[in-house]
Amino acid sequence: DAAPWLIGRRVFTGNGTRHVYVRGLIEAIRASRPDVIDLYEEPFSLVALQTLVLRDLFAPRAALIFYSAVNVDRRWRWPYRAIERLVLRRADGAHAPNHDVPRILRGRGMRTQHISVIPLGVDIGRFSEAEPMPLLGIPGPRIGFVGRLEPVKGLEVLLDAFSCLATEASLVIAGDGSERASVQARIESLPRKAAAFVLPPVSYEVMPAFLK
């Protein structure tokens, strides 16, 4: 029989690296005593440290596998740098969505453990069958971004490139996040601000139509 889902409760959820579980994770590991823990969190996160400690306490023989999508060589500030170093040394393996991540993990100290590349899946049918969403008042050609408006996404680079564009085009940014206000302010300072548009987040259901 399939194991039941257990919904946990977290605190400090405003940042993907700082949240921790106050309910759910502890009970799950203590009750199930798993053989394998597949942690879908970055190795520098507080949850990664929390999971490592709970594994050692309640399931010391369990293999700890984690996910990472960091494909550029970034340097974290303390304590994330120390957490990553510990998790990379103590984890039993990792999986990543592309071939750049293993190189980063090896360079950070994950020398001998196995790292598998498992590409992100996509439902081709959803995208091939979708009808384009009408974006009224936004002339083409369009340059698009959809996702979290966070520093790690490189929106400053996109805005710098758009400001240098010599041909006519529209910039469409869809999403939300901590950088939304600064992105809007930066657009207001562009010489071609009338050609840049910031839209609300796009739902999963309409993503194919939006991208088309």
Image (cartoon, rainbow, N blue to C red):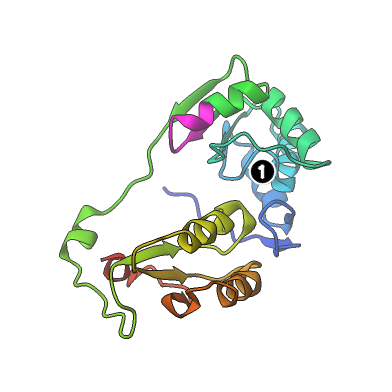
Question: In the image, what residue occupies the spot 48% across and 31% down?
Answer: 100
Q: At numbered mark 1, what does the secondary structure look like: helix, strand or loop?
A: helix
Crowding at dot 1, Cα within 10 Å, few <14 / some 14-19 / many 20+, comes out as some
Give the answer, above or below, for where 79 lies relative to 184.
Answer: above
Q: Which picture quadrant has residue 182?
A: bottom right
Residue 76 in the image, given as x and y percentages of width and height: 74, 40
Residue 199 in the image, given as x and y percentages of width and height: 46, 77
Q: Is residue 39 magenta?
A: no
Question: In the image, what residue occupies the spot 76% across and 29% down?
Answer: 86
Q: Is residue 169 visible?
A: yes
Residue 12 in the image, given as x and y percentages of width and height: 76, 62
Depth check: 64 or 199 in front? Answer: 199
Quadrant assignment for the C terminus: bottom left
Question: In the image, what residue occupies the spot 50% across and 76% down?
Answer: 193
Q: Amino acid at mark 1?
A: Ile
Residue 140 horizontal side relative to residue 159, left or right: left
Residue under pointer 1: 29
